[in-house]
Image: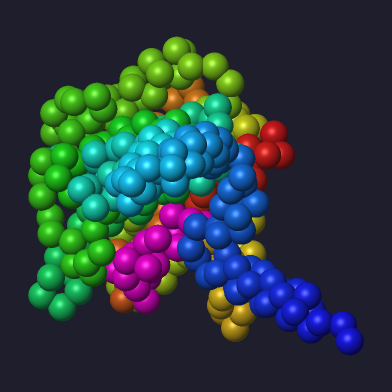
Amino acid sequence: MTSPLPSLLRSFAGFLLIVIAFQDVTGHPAVTTFKAKAKKTTWHASARSRSASKRSTGITAKATRSSAHSVKMTKSVKTTASAKKVAARSNVVVMPLLGKRDAHVAVLDRKLSGCVYYLASGHGGPDPGAVGHAGKSLLAEDEYAYDVTIRLARVLLQHGASVYMLVQDPNDGIRDGALLPIDYDEVAYPNQAISHHQTTRLRQTTTAVNQQFARHKGYQRFVTLHVDSRSKGQAVDVFFYHHPGSKAGQKLAQHIHRKFQTNYKRYRPARPYCGRVSSRSSLYVVKNSHAPTVFIELGNIQNQLDQRRFLLADNRQALANWLYQGLASDYHTR
């Protein structure tokens, strides 16, 4: 009689694939990406572990011939654990700006290896940007745009990219609260006080981008995130601007836009997505940045429906994940 075990294992494996696929489309970083690349990204860990296993086999053999068997076995376990820790550290990027909890980022794969991204959240420092209200609480554009931006930075690092945060808050990190307190301690890259003067502040950003753009080679993109301010009754979807003379900027915006269309159809099928892509030469950073640039408005900070898009931490993470999907699509179809 044939054993039922192989068929059971195949059924269980199929169930896991279904679960993984479901997790992959629920707004979280792709589990399937990690699974597909696990052998490659943890190769050093596996190789070191195998070496450690050989050493432990020798130690165990010696221990069998001695009276100190338990002591030798303990040494073997410690050797293997140490090798795994060394290997694990080689696949971790440290970014203190993410906050103490999230500063150590595990690199899941190298899909974006060689890519350089410049990320800027709107306003910051002395300028909170647009301000909305949730009950008696104030909602500042720079705080919510920053949290989505820093989350996007983490996802990009997870996939092997190089990331420059052009607006930096030394102590916020990734925050999970709905009401993000307003502060004024953000600085401009690399560590400059953010100017009170709007044009000077914008020039700080573009100068930093252009200096690094000249130093790096290959695929480089600039993403700047904002929250719009309109009348309370006007709900808007996420929309995108690019420079009319930049084909690469237009393509970048279109790829991200398409990912938002796809995700809206998947998660909000009863509601059409009305976000758009358009050119805008009057935006200072779009006009003056050498890297292909996309300027993104995440919603209307005055509108209660739009506020849900960035008040909930899970939604801010979903925005970051969808932005990553669009950026990855643009890179892989270049």
Q: How many labels does the image show?
A: 0
Instruction: Name the residue at 29% across, 68% down.
Output: 311
Magenta segment, which residues? Answer: 305-322
In the current view of this chain or complex, which residue is farthest to the right?
A: 1
Instruction: Name the residue at 55% across, 60% down.
Output: 31
Give the image quarter of residue 106.
Answer: top left
Is residue 222 rendered magenta in the image? no
The C terminus lies in quadrant? top right
Q: Looking at the image, which is closer to me, 87 or 194?
A: 87
Instruction: Name the residue at 15% across, 78% down.
Output: 135
Q: Position of residue 46 (x, y in %)?
A: 54, 41
Is residue 307 rendered magenta in the image? yes
Could you tell me what secondary structure mostly forms the magenta stretch?
Answer: helix
Q: Where is residue 138 in the image (x, y as percent from the top left)?
A: 14, 65
Give the image quarter of residue 233.
Answer: bottom left
Left or right, 175 with respect to 84, comes to left
The N terminus lies in quadrant? bottom right
Instruction: Name the residue at 39% across, 24% down.
Output: 209
In the current view of this chain or complex, which residue is farthest to the top?
A: 215
Q: Position of residue 299 (x, y in %)?
A: 39, 62
Q: Where is residue 218 in the image (x, y as percent from the top left)?
A: 58, 21
Give the image quarter of residue 269.
Answer: bottom right
In the current view of this chain or complex, which residue is farthest to the bottom?
A: 1
Q: Looking at the image, which is closer to me, 185 or 135?
A: 185
Q: Which colour scheme is used?
A: rainbow
Tell me, yes or no, if residue 52 can be seen here. no
Q: Looking at the image, which is closer to me, 234 or 203?
A: 203
Left or right, 131 with respect to 324, comes to left
Tell me, yes or no, if residue 323 can be seen here. yes
